[in-house]
Amino acid sequence: MSFDSLGLAAPLLKAIADAGYTTPTPIQAQAIPAVLNGGDLMAGAQTGTGKTAGFTLPLLHRLATGEKLLNKRGKIAIRALVLTPTRELAAQVEESVQTYGKYLPLKSMVMFGGVGMQPQINKLRDGVDILVATPGRLLDHAQQGTLDLSQVQILVLDEADRMLDMGFVHDIKKVLALLPAKKQSLLFSATFSDEIKNLADRLLNAPALIEVARRNQTNDAIAQKVHPVGRERKKELLAHLIKGGHGGEPWHQVLIFTRMKHGANRLTDYLNDQGISAMAIHGNKSQGARTKALADFKSGDLTCLVATDIAARGIDIDQLPHVVNFELPNVPEDYVHRIGRTGRAGAQGEAVSLVCVDENGFLRDIEKLIKREIPKEIVPGFAPDPNERAEPIVLGRTVLNPNGSRGRNPNPPAGANGRGGRGGHGGGGGRGGESRGGSRDGARPSGHAGKPGGAHTGVGGAKTAAKPHAQHAPRSASSQPSRGDGSAPRHNNGPRLTQPKR
Ligand code: AMP
């Protein structure tokens, strides 16, 4: 199939050709005609499937062929709103809007927190057709009266599951209240939890349903390895590996994942002390610092980028030679996401996980999901102490205890029911902790988790191994005092959920 057969306007086809795309991806082949039809859409697609073009192209087509509208001030009215969970994703989506819309007379802007309001106000005043925004900053503008969404015709919720995971449910509802009732709504989500289905029920009108297969299988071109190591020696081992101490050349471009923001900061300091250039990238960093870290990393000036899952998501860095899980993710799907960053075209990538005794439960969950055992290799001099005991892992205000059963915390603290206000969230799931709040739009991160009821159905209809690990992390997960050593506090053979002592 070619793009020509999808009914897109010539300026879009020209931009597609400029981008070098010849064939629509499966999500594009399905989503583009559905959106051009004018109906609502619920689409299951992860990053990497081409979903952005899947909604951007038909959105641009509809705006370009529709009538331009003016707002009360006589300026171009916003006709399309795209909401994204993170700043990075917002920036990337708007870049796609510009790329695909370059031959069209449409104006777009991106809006997110962490940067000044005034330039955004100025741009809004000039008038834009398409606004790409994170919910928090959008609401700030709405409250200040600098934003008029009354003429929006198309709404896109991109990575809706992540938005819910990050506690944006109330913000989304507030945004919806600012929009006209009659509009075309498109909801993109990698997973379909009950929360997502509830949101879809509220928002979508007889939607077309599109599903593309989940990518829970890892790529064979990626060499995966687990280095078992003592909890306190992870940093040392990492520096050893990066310096080429385990054979081979020193590593030059290493994406390192931690679970929490403080962990990312402490690890960065340690690596810098060891003479290894490293920068952390997460939601507490200014946009400028993040952009610089990313640029330096891409150019090769920076050896290590230390990221939380949220911060790394949506960043267009992939094909890296080395990805390191300094801490295993508590959500098994995140492992697949993380290591999908490695594997250069043609060449092998390497994904290394430093796993201490606390994380054996996480490792089992991951191996179950990817349906293979990851080879274990002890690095000489770094063998874990066989007497080391598993300790609970603290994720924000949630603790995953060793040897406990999984389930909903029967005694969530006051205000943790997710109905209280911005930053609240719904039921349990594995998305807890600060790593999930990383890139949040200047608002408080919330721990939570969008997978109530245990296993959820994958987009392709397959049951995935997701289960409710963590639950509520009601207020800022980052306010949780952390262990001083930067290591994940402990784990877990099937975590029981309790609140840590305050
Ligand atoms: P996305 O899932 O939207 O993040 O897109 C993943 C990547 O696929 C981006 O780098 C796009 O530039 C690229 N891409 C999107 N559509 C196509 C296509 N039809 N052919 C080739 N590459 C594409």
Image (spheres, rainbow, N blue to C red):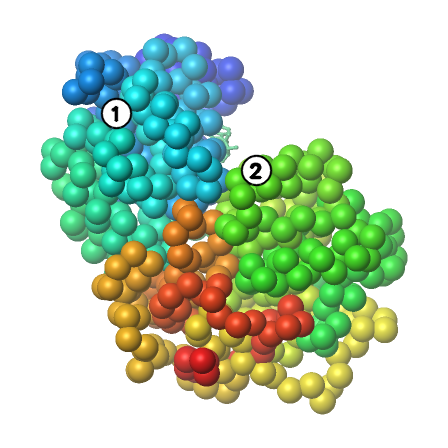
Q: Position of residue 323 (x, y in %)?
A: 67, 52
- Left/right of residue 84 with respect to residue 176 in the rendered view: right
Ligand 1 within 8 Å of the CB at mark 1 = no
Return the residue nearer the eye: 487 or 456. Answer: 487
Question: Residue 288's mark?
Answer: 2
- Left/right of residue 434 with respect to residue 37 in the rendered view: right
Question: Residue 228's mark?
Answer: none
Quadrant (top left/top right/bottom left/bottom right) for the N terminus: top left
The residue sitting at 28% across, 75% down in the picture is 414
Residue 155 drawn above or below residue 420: above
Q: Position of residue 42 (x, y in %)?
A: 26, 43
Q: Where is residue 388, by image quadrant?
A: bottom right
- Left/right of residue 374 with respect to residue 362 in the rendered view: right
The residue sitting at 32% across, 35% down in the picture is 82
Farthest residue, direction bottom: 387
Ligand 1 within 8 Å of the CB at mark 2 = no
Q: Closer to the N terminus: mark 1 or mark 2?
A: 1
Residue 401 drawn above or below residue 352: below
Residue 266 seen anywhere in this rendered image of the structure: yes
Q: Residues within 10 Å of mark 2 (few under 14, many from 20)?
A: few
- Left/right of residue 268 with respect to residue 432 in the rendered view: right
Question: Residue 78's mark?
Answer: 1
Quadrant (top left/top right/bottom left/bottom right) for the C terminus: bottom left
Return the residue nearer the eye: 294 or 413. Answer: 413
Task: Report the amino acid beneath label 2.
Answer: Gly
Q: Whole-Å distance between the Cαs marked 1 and 2?
A: 27 Å
Return the residue nearer the eye: 154 or 34. Answer: 154
The residue sitting at 43% across, 44% down in the picture is 86
Farthest residue, direction left: 181
The residue sitting at 32% across, 25% down in the picture is 124
Task: Report the amino acid beneath label 1.
Answer: Ile
